[in-house]
Amino acid sequence: MKKTTIFSVLLLCLVLALCACAGKEDEDKSSKRKNSKTEQSGPGTNEVTPTQDPSGNTPVPTIPHVDPVPTPESFAFSAVVSDTDRMVKEAVEQYKNEDYTRLSEPVKYYVLWLGFTHVTFGDLDFRMTDFDREYLEAVALNYEKTVESISDHNVDITVYLYFVEDAMPLTQYPGEDWFYLDITTAMPFIEKYSAGKEIDTVLTTIQTDGEENRQRNEDKDGYGEHYAILGLKTDGIESPIGYSTFNLCTPAEGTYPLADPEIPSLYATAVAVHEWMHQLEYLKAMLGVEYPDTHAYAGPPSYPHYQKYIADLNDYDFFEFYKLVLKGQCPYTDENGVKRVGMYPKMWPLIKRNVLNLGTFTIQASDKSGYLTGTDGDNPLTLTDEVSTWIIRYSGDRRFILSPEKYPNLRMDLGNAWDSEGNTVGVWIYTGYVDAQSWILLDNGEGTYSIQTPYPSGRLVTVTQKGEQARIYTDSAVAGVQKWIIKKVEDR
């Protein structure tokens, strides 16, 4: 190649490089000007940045960006259904295969245990002594370590034990001579001592035995006729909170102090385990499998297919039976042979309070016209301006139980269990009519749910006018509210 040609090419490259640098500098200056103008007309200035129109003449104001109306935030009930149904399926598989494979991690289970040191019934007055307090601490420890050991440490129990010094009244059971500590009486203390804690169940204990209490009460009306219960389970995992109450039995000679906390050596421990085991009986319905009643130690004829156990000859208070149930090894004999029933490892996660009890929610009309409110009046389910709250619990098979927080013993109920167009919906006590008191929360895909009966008709809870009682109608059959924003209330 000729030298003149090489020189010409080099000169051309140099010119192109200089042009590129000049363009970059102009671009940088333009960018700086734009940034400067943006800073001057930024947030809070209410200025609109003009934009040149295509003709290059009149500035055209930029239209401010407007965010779309957000979709209401509703709770993800479908995720709860999917997760819980998965756990149920896995538990049933393990049960069918008699598979005792331990959980990779134990289930954390939290017990609030309240010792009521002073209870009354009329003139009768029962109090714990210093020894009773010390003894109850040993019972709580014995309960905790015993159940953990029997379960092969598939459950890790934490007991929060507190003593209540206030004098509290007992409640007489209707038509009976015995009385107990009602959950409504204990509730202020449950709320006080559970604040800021995760609680799966509540146990309460009173003291009615002992020489001091005998001397204090033997000359009073009712002593020896009325008596405090040995134990009572009032609510289990199918309720907003599990609750059992019982009296503290005087320890048998030689059983206290504890020789080994993992050995169920105290009679009061057996009572605590017994009443708590009643709370687990819901697993039979939840899983659809044979699960032993806590009294099945009685055997036939009341409990066919189970063998009879004798108290104290086989450990304290039928504890041999309790062990077999909590280990999933209780023999159940029918025409198919012997099946080992009770708690299998993958059942333990299903006794957690928050597995079924999802929390407290508001149920608001999709058009924001009011809140669904359940009361115990003549029109118990209406749309009102009052912000009402509901306890929602999963009951399996895609169904949920809805209870007003003010009246947790009631639940949303289809009148007379009639699946008919326009039938009323209210709140009522548990009736046993499962289809009439459980509901499908139908996701509308827009941040709202419809509350649907589980009957084949699929009718929806409908409020046609504020203040009128809710009814069920086919989708869009009448004008009214059939879609609801269901939002979880944050921890209070």
Image: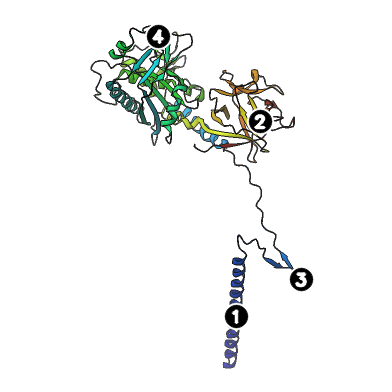
Disc sitting over residue 22 in the figure: 1
Give the residue number, with chain letter if any, for mark 2: 383
Disc sitting over residue 226 in the figure: 4
Please, what secondary structure does the residue beneath circle 1 have?
helix
Q: Does the rendering let one see residue 291? A: no
Q: Earlier in the sequence, mark 4 or mark 3?
A: 3
Q: Amino acid at mark 1?
A: Ala
Q: Amino acid at mark 4?
A: His
- Name the residue located 64 percent from the left edge and 40 percent from the top edge: 445
Q: Residue 479: percent from the left, percent from the top?
A: 74, 32
Q: Earlier in the sequence, mark 2 or mark 4?
A: 4
- Name the residue located 59 percent from the left edge and 41 percent from the top edge: 73
According to the image, what is the colour scheme of the structure? rainbow
Q: CA distance from mark 1 to mark 3?
A: 27 Å
- Name the residue located 46 percent from the left edge and 12 percent from the top edge: 173
Q: Quadrant of residue 399?
A: top right
